[in-house]
Image (cartoon, rainbow, N blue to C red):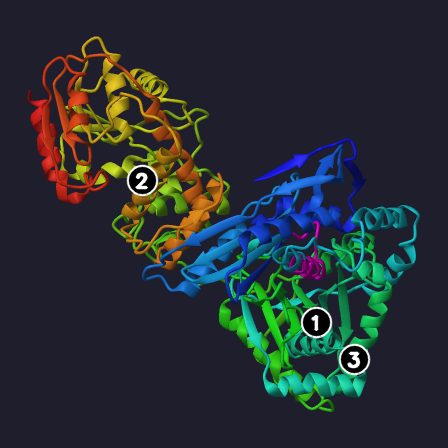
Amino acid sequence: MTTVDARVDTFTVPATPMQEALWWVHQRARNQSVYNLTLRLACDRAPDTDALAAAWQTVIDRHEAMRTSVVQQDGTITLVVLPKVTATMQRVEVDDPGTAPVDTLLRLLAEEIHEQTIDLSRAPLARLTTVRVGTEHELVLTVHHVVLDGWALQLLLTDLSTAYQAIVRGDRPEFEAEAVPFSVYARESVAARDAGEWQPSLDHWRSTLDGAVSTTVAADHDRFAGTGAAGVTLRYAFSREANEGVAALGKVTFGTPFAVMLAAMQVVLARGGAGEEVSVGAVIANRMTPRDQALVGYTANLCIARATIGDEDTLADVVGRSRDAMWTMLAHQNVPYSAVFGSLTESTQAMLNDYAPLLLNYLGPIGIGAMLGDITLTQHLTPNRAARSDIAIAFWEIDGGGYLAEIEYNTGRYERQTVQRLLHDLDSVLAADPQATVSGLEVRSRAVAGFVDHRPAEAPPAARLPNSPLWQQVGHIWREVLGDDPHDQDEDFFAMGGRSLKVLQLAAAIESETGHSLDLIRWLAEPTPRRLVDQLTEDRPTTVSTLVVLREGDGPHLHLVHGAGGAAHDYRALLVALPSGWRVTLSQEREPLPGVPEMAASYRADLDAAGLRPDLLCGWSMGGQICFELAAGYPEPPRLAVLDAAPPVGYENDADREAERLDSFVATVCGSLDVDLAGSLPVTSGDNPELAMRALAACLGAAGETVPAATLIERWGTYRRHTLAVSAYVTDRVLAAPVLLVGAQLLDVQLDQWAQRFATPPHRIRIDTTHYGLLGPEFADQLAAEIQSLMER
């Protein structure tokens, strides 16, 4: 939660060309967390959260970039710098993790926090979260790359530590120097472009890169290659021999560690099949002056490192040329790659690409000696779930000597062993004798030109499915969600382990990969691969009815209504137990409706449009209230079965009720997944449903059930809206119709309140189960028998 003091001294400045380019890339990224930069920091003891909150406010006040939003105004990307932004820290606590491994839960919490949405139009484009699981404490510091780069993030952490230490002592925070305003740098960058000062560098890059071909590692799968694809990060500690090799090569060639690492990667790619010429991306800090080195902002740039490597070159030769290329690169690093790429010939653009599929970055001694006041911080693996490119590798020095690498890679294109093979090859080349010839260095990795579609194809589809691109795609999505290929075209989703949340995961995957929105309600009537394909190939109606036919029949017509946050699949067990000749239909909300009366009116309209008048209405949870309202609209109300639905007497909505609502939602989720969250539920700060759902997703993941947070967020929004509608629904009307009233967790007084709404006493039964267990297979036959008996009255 942030509040903004927008006084007259708020001002705007054009974004730097690099910020502008990144803003546009962010808009089209598949996963927009791809440009979130996150430090996950373990604390050796609990921080003082009040002091930390005050320190966080101090660094926001100190640095312009922390008070900057990035917006589009009249087609121009603009920085809006606010004089004051008040920000609150986030908090996530799990008192008792139960049987969940603490390390796993902490990692998953960090990944979820990292993926939280950052609204680029609302400063600060950063957040600080304290995380506690049991007695373990961590900080998760996240900023958006459009306002800060990795160098600046380290400066920010240093300032946070300084401010925290002073506030804990009771002192006013003081810093060694005034903060450098980023707006000054931004204006200078735009002015240099407009004055033509970039032209010499553009000429250099046009000449240097003419005819260059991007190089990458041969992919294992022919899938999406681009910014924001699904990704993962792993760490690799270089061997003692490799670390000694870096030092030896640096000594022989006077090359920096980055020049050595870059040369070694170029050799691996050349020996892996790229040929004599290799071009990869190098991230350069672009901070050549003391002022820029102290700047908290985004200055880093991408440059293309092009090299020619002959078989008879020695390793030292390659490093020497890499050293020279790096020095030349530094002289021309200030021109954004987007401008460089735009200046290239069309033929070079076609072979080079507007992003580097393979990226290298050198971070120096990042993380060594990190502190929060006198609290020792340990930097954990970066919690990314998205990839900026095919493979991005960051190197840094570690305490005690040696080097560590973090590798972010596109999991849709690469298997883990392919990336590990690349790292082992890099380690082997670094460990080689500086005078070893390139032709004598053996590698197992395979390299290809980035623009060439030269990737191993997917395994052919199983014979049990038709051999077509669409069926391949549906089979792939089915496998991703359920863990196995469909055995035939009519395989039942639920028979293969599908559950309600996996249904939503399937729908999200269908929309992501095909661009089509799955009509879930219609599909759930026959949840098979065949019906998925049918929907993906048919013309969709402009308006979709709320009415779903679950079963045709010439017997009595039973009409079901969904519960709070529920859907057709909640009634699956009951549907199987009902007589086979019955016609069964269901009403399902298609668009958000404000309350029970509006839902009932919409569902009645679609029943009437289909010429249907049910013999019996049946609703569980909120569905019981909607069925009552539906029945009241008929001159002669149909029979009514109310299954553990709250009576329509109105309920208060306060903080306690909201907490109960969240607990109930968690119980619903766990029940649908058959997961027991041992221990305590996560507690999050403030009114932040996204954070709460992400914390729940982490706990479910640690318990072995992966549920996308987006699915939980969407489902929680629907569930909360529905339960608020239940609380608001009040009626004192009395229906004259045969009624079955089933209680599970309802109190006797609530059953009495329902009974007052009927002209004749309802048939009341109580079933010893939970609200969510009532529709399970264990009680399906009993409920079906009671409903049949009601139909006969």
Name the element at disc 3: loop
All told, the count of numbered labels is: 3
- The stretch drawn in magenta includes residue 647: no
Label 1 or label 3, whichever comes before in sequence order: 3
SS state under label 1: loop
Residue at 30 percent across and 15 percent down: it is: 608
Q: Residue tagged by mark 2?
A: 664
Mark 1 and mark 3: span between their CA atoms? 14 Å
- Label 3 belongs to which residue? 255
Q: Is residue 766 visible?
A: yes
Query: Which SS type dominates the magenta stretch?
Result: helix
Is disc 1 in contact with disc 3, using a CB cutoff of under 8 Å?
A: no
- The residue closer to the viewer here, 517 or 535, is 517
Q: Quadrant of residue 369?
A: bottom right
Q: CA distance from mark 2 to mark 3?
A: 62 Å
Point out the image quarter for the N terminus.
top right
The disc placed on residue 364 is: 1
Q: Nearer the viewer, mark 2 or mark 3?
A: 2
- Give the amino acid at mark 2: Ser
Question: Do the CB atoms of the residues marked 2 and 3 lie less than 8 Å apart?
Answer: no
Residue beneath the point at 82% across and 59% down: 292
Q: Amino acid at mark 1?
A: Gly
* Residue extending furthest toward the front: 170
Residue bounds of the magenta highlight: 144-162
- State left or right for residue 507 relative to residue 547: right
Of the 4 image quadrants, the one containing the C terminus is: top left
Q: Position of residue 235 (x, y in %)?
A: 55, 71
Quarter where residue 104 is shown:
bottom left
Name the quadrant containing residue 536. top left
- Is residue 73 depicted above or below 291 in this figure? above
